[in-house]
Image (cartoon, helix red, strand yellow):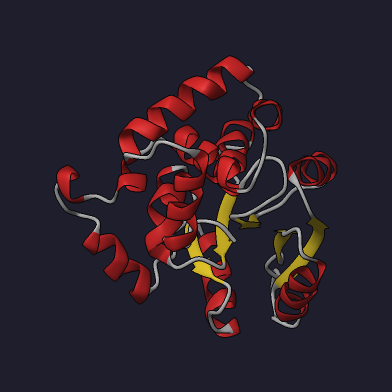
Amino acid sequence: MKVASPIRVLIADDHRIVRRGLLHILNASPGITVIGEASDYNGITDILREQPCDVLLLDISMPGKDGIEILHLLKKREPMLRIMVLSSHGPEQFAVRALKAGAASYLTKDGAPDELVEAVRVVARGRKYISKGLAESLANHVIEEDDLMPHEQLSNREFQTVRMIASGQTRTEIAKNLSISPKTVSVYRSRVFEKMGVRTNAELTRYVIEHGLLE
């Protein structure tokens, strides 16, 4: 009888302790093998060039390019790659954006190890894994546009700009990380200020912190 090939998983998280924990959980699960670990976008692409991968576990908060940007880039580069997003944030902050960007699942890091393993198996079969908590959160987002929070009305690029400003990055640093010009960063900043009703970087940062949008 032919033995099924193991599910090949790549772990992408900038915290070594988190990677070690995920590695331990997954390698202890029958039929799953971790093919590598990466701490940033370049590390992910380096590994993908060397060997095939079935499921990528991707942290939403990565250095340089954040998780949403990496999602967009990888789905263009590897359209068949199944990507699961892991986050320290609750689903109300990032889940909708992640799923729209092509994620096959969104899990929080405080979830149960058994759920992580189950999600990997489901996603590897080409399906999406939606937990009960995430399903409830998504249902709450099926509302009128006027009822959305200010940050929920931003485009993905505007949202990235918000988080980078709040993290203290300069206009030049943001431009480099997003591969755009400093002038374009200024345009995004102006749009963000108008949509969110803030006038300064300090007000924007306060909003981001209060709503748990930055680790």
* Residue 203, image x, y percentages: 45, 46
Q: Is residue 90 above or below residue 115?
A: above
Residue 36 image position (x, y, % from top left): 82, 58
Q: Is residue 118 left or right of residue 92?
A: right
**Quadrant containing the C terminus in the rendered view:** bottom right
Q: Position of residue 103 (x, y in %)?
A: 49, 51
Left or right placement of residue 165 versus residue 144 in this view:
right
Q: How many marks?
A: 0
Quadrant assignment, res 211: bottom left
Residue 44, compared with residue 116, is above or below; it is above
> For the N terminus, which image quadrant?
bottom right
- In the rendered view, would you say 199 is above or below 83? above
> Does residue 80 appear anywhere in the picture?
no
Q: Residue at x 60, y 82 (%)?
A: 113
Task: Please state which of residues 110 and 193 is positioned toward the viewer in this rendering.
Answer: 193
Q: What residue do we see at 33% from left, 31% from top?
A: 194
Q: Position of residue 92 (x, y in %)?
A: 37, 62
The vertical placement of 58 against 145, above or below, is: below
Q: Along the line of sight, which residue is nearer the eye, 50 or 108?
A: 108
Residue at 51% across, 68% down: 107
User: Which sits in the foreground, 125 or 137?
Assistant: 137
At x 41% / y 64%, what residue is drawn? 91
* Residue 28 visible in rendering: yes
